[in-house]
Image (cartoon, rainbow, N blue to C red):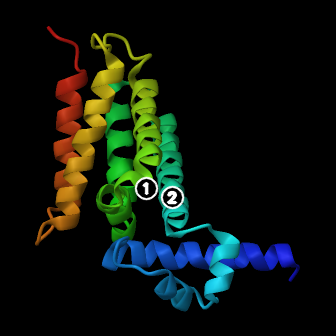
Amino acid sequence: MTAEQRLADRRERLITAAYTLFAQPGFHDTTIERLCSTARISNRAFYECFTNRDELMRAVYERCVEETLDAVSRAVEKAAPTLNDRILAGVGEYIRFVTMDVRRARLMHLEVRRAGDVLSSARQLAVKGFSQVIQNAVGDVPHALPPDLHLLSLGLTGAITELLIEWVLADPAPPVDGLIETATHIFHRSLQPET
């Protein structure tokens, strides 16, 4: 491998280790030494890849968000152009994709908050991205425009976040189908035109 390939390989091994360790035991309980041990690299090699643990957390979180946004956007694009079909496709795919791997759910909805200021700007960008998906999905559906779709989409993003935090923390966790049913109900009630 070239030096560039070795660096890329170490970086990927650190991201993989962080994906597991930042999810459990958590961001604040994971040391650089433990990350390096899990990734099988030296502490010096860590600093060739990332300036600090915060930067690594940001990289892991942003990858989770990007993968989720891609999955949800594809599902909405494939759905029939009705409000109901787009809600079912987008909400269902978001919740199924995030809960497919509890590490992703923990990172995106629990550890992002626990990390605090480290991820505040990344989290704001993620919320903006997900609210934009909602706006794009319903913006051209006839009679589906509330007075301020932007604010409503932010609220709907927050509702799904809270449902997924409950899924991560509750024992036993609520069934995924129940989360989808609840979230689609919230979306339907919020986006249906008033009669």
Position of 37 compared to 195: left or right?
right
Position of 31 compared to 176: left or right?
right
Residue at the (36%, 60%) spot, across then down: 115
**Observer-nearest residue: 4 or 95?**
4
Percent position of residue 19, x then y: 47, 72
Position of 155 compared to 83: left or right?
left
Query: Mark 2 = which residue?
Result: 58
- Which quadrant of the view contains residue 27? bottom left
Tell me: residue 118, above or below residue 133. Answer: below
Residue at the (75%, 75%) spot, across then down: 7
What is the count of numbered marks? Answer: 2
- Which quadrant of the view contains residue 145? top left
The residues bearing labels 1 and 2 have C-alpha atoms spaced at a distance of 8 Å
Tag 1 and tag 2, C-beta contact below 8 Å? yes
Percent position of residue 138, x then y: 39, 23
Badge 1: residue crowd in 10 Å (few <14, some 14–19, many ≥20): some
Q: Is residue 80 visible?
A: no
Which quadrant: the C terminus?
Answer: top left
Q: Which mark is residue 42?
A: none
Q: Amino acid at mark 2?
A: Arg
Badge 2: residue crowd in 10 Å (few <14, some 14–19, many ≥20): some
Q: Secondary structure at mark 2?
A: helix
Residue at the (52%, 43%) spot, across then down: 74
Q: Is residue 184 visible?
A: yes
Percent position of residue 114, x then y: 30, 61
Query: Mark 1 = which residue?
Result: 118
Q: Amino acid at mark 1?
A: Val
**Observer-nearest residue: 168 or 95?**
168
Foreground label between 1 and 2: 1
Tell me: residue 74, above or below residue 56. Answer: above
